[in-house]
Amino acid sequence: MTGRIYGIGLGPGDPDLMSVKAHRLLSLARHVAYFRKQGRAGRARTMVNGLLPEAAQEVAMEYPVTTEVPVSDPRYNEMLSGFYSDCTTRLTDITARGEDVVVLCEGDPFFYGSFMHLYERLKDNTAVEVVPGITGMSAAWTASGAPITWGDDVLTVLMGTLSEADLTRHMGDSDALVIMKVGRNFKKICDVLKVSGKYDAAWLVEYAAMDGQTVQRLSDVSPDHKAPYFSIILVHGQGRRP
Amino acid sequence: MTGRIYGIGLGPGDPDLMSVKAHRLLSLARHVAYFRKQGRAGRARTMVNGLLPEAAQEVAMEYPVTTEVPVSDPRYNEMLSGFYSDCTTRLTDITARGEDVVVLCEGDPFFYGSFMHLYERLKDNTAVEVVPGITGMSAAWTASGAPITWGDDVLTVLMGTLSEADLTRHMGDSDALVIMKVGRNFKKICDVLKVSGKYDAAWLVEYAAMDGQTVQRLSDVSPDHKAPYFSIILVHGQGRRP
């Protein structure tokens, strides 16, 4: 009997927004794995403080690289590929002993994020179960105090890392927008929203459902603002409402 | 002291996928309100079977119309507008007595859905708190066994009720697709996916995270298939993966 790997969505940050199922799996976990940046506690791990059994064994999976090597550099892919293979081996060494592993995933495991790279390497030979979670974008539009989509609104989810041309084209043809990976792309995103005529309707949500949550009209924020990684820019849809 | 209204996302169907917070609010609820079709138990209400306190008072809000009058008919908007105003009065009659009401919302309250029509009428005069939930689309891509978006993939969420022209344009310019409100729009959606060259990559997920969940390649399904309301069509992104 080999063990099973659970990729569990922890939701956007507030442990109260974790699913009942994720909460139960955590409270029974013998092995808990999570990604983190070297030298950091890891945000996923921090989210479950106080929720793990004392005897739980931890598997910290530390990225060999985050932003030091650009994504376009072939070494980036090589380093990460080797890293995910190593992680896979660490997890399957545990399941081979007949024990289960819970892998902590911020947000929803199958919506961007890192777990899917393990999933692709595991799924053909190991029992893997994925537990969906509340996405960071749901927390962001909830924090904004306004529905993101109404009636037949089209919603487009864009990464701030896209080119100006791609961002402009997509922004112009959507009712509602969610823009993630804002961070160092903040100024570019603001510029493109201005070109698209959506700047004045846009909102910046930082640390949604986490400590330090802020919600601001984008036009009230300086273009030189240093947006943290956990920033989401929203444009709400304006569709049919009786 | 007036009461508070909680719009709580119940998630996609499986009560185990409800948030810890939604679960707690339910278990303490004195008044529970939910939408339903006339003569039906109501799906949101059914989802919380066994989770409500025995003494909880129920407020069933029955749609005066669902599909009998077309959305384009002005009477549709009029009837629904009056209905939502009546519901608002029923809820504020309770909060005026200093008692809280929990409103059950399938999925996430601010992502399509009906609660937002109450929210807009309540928010300026009543304390309203929204609890986000796992969306039906998260349950659908989890059920499909493959991540929906990778790296910088663009995700577009489309309603099957859109015109062929709108659907075609958006489908052609997105990496990943989620198509909701499939039901009677099934054949139209299939035709447009064929034109967009995405038909062979599309999946049909019915009743995600509910009893009777099915996952099929769209090309394995007859074009005459009667897709239920709770159907979602997915095309997975194929973005960067180390």
Image (cartoon, coloured by chain):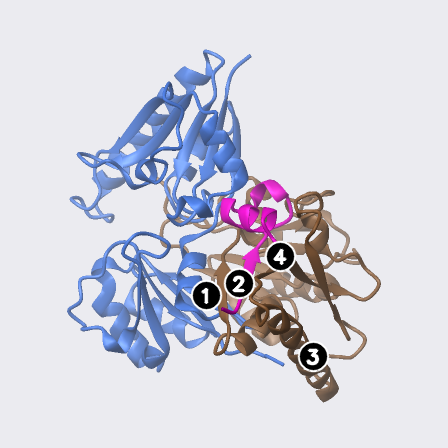
Chain colours: A brown, B blue
Left or right of B3: which side holds A115? right
Residue B153 lies, with reference to residue B22, above or below; the image says below
Front of the two marks 2 and 3: 3
User: What's the magenta region?
Assistant: A1-30
User: Which element carries disc 1, helix, strand or loop?
Assistant: strand
User: Which element carries disc 3, helix, strand or loop?
Assistant: helix
Let me know if marks 3 and 1 both belong to one chain.
no
Can you tell which quarter of the image residue B68 is in? top left
**Chain at tag 1:** B
Residue B152 lies, with reference to residue A204, above or below; the image says below
Q: Label 2 belongs to which residue?
A: A157
Q: Label 1 belongs to which residue?
A: B156
What is the C-alpha distance between the residues marked 1 and 2? 6 Å
From the viewer's side, name the closer residue of B95 and A131: A131
Residue B129 lies, with reference to residue B182, above or below; the image says above
**Residue at the spot 44% in from the left edge and 28% down from the top edge:** B102
**Chain at tag 4:** A
Q: Label 4 belongs to which residue?
A: A106
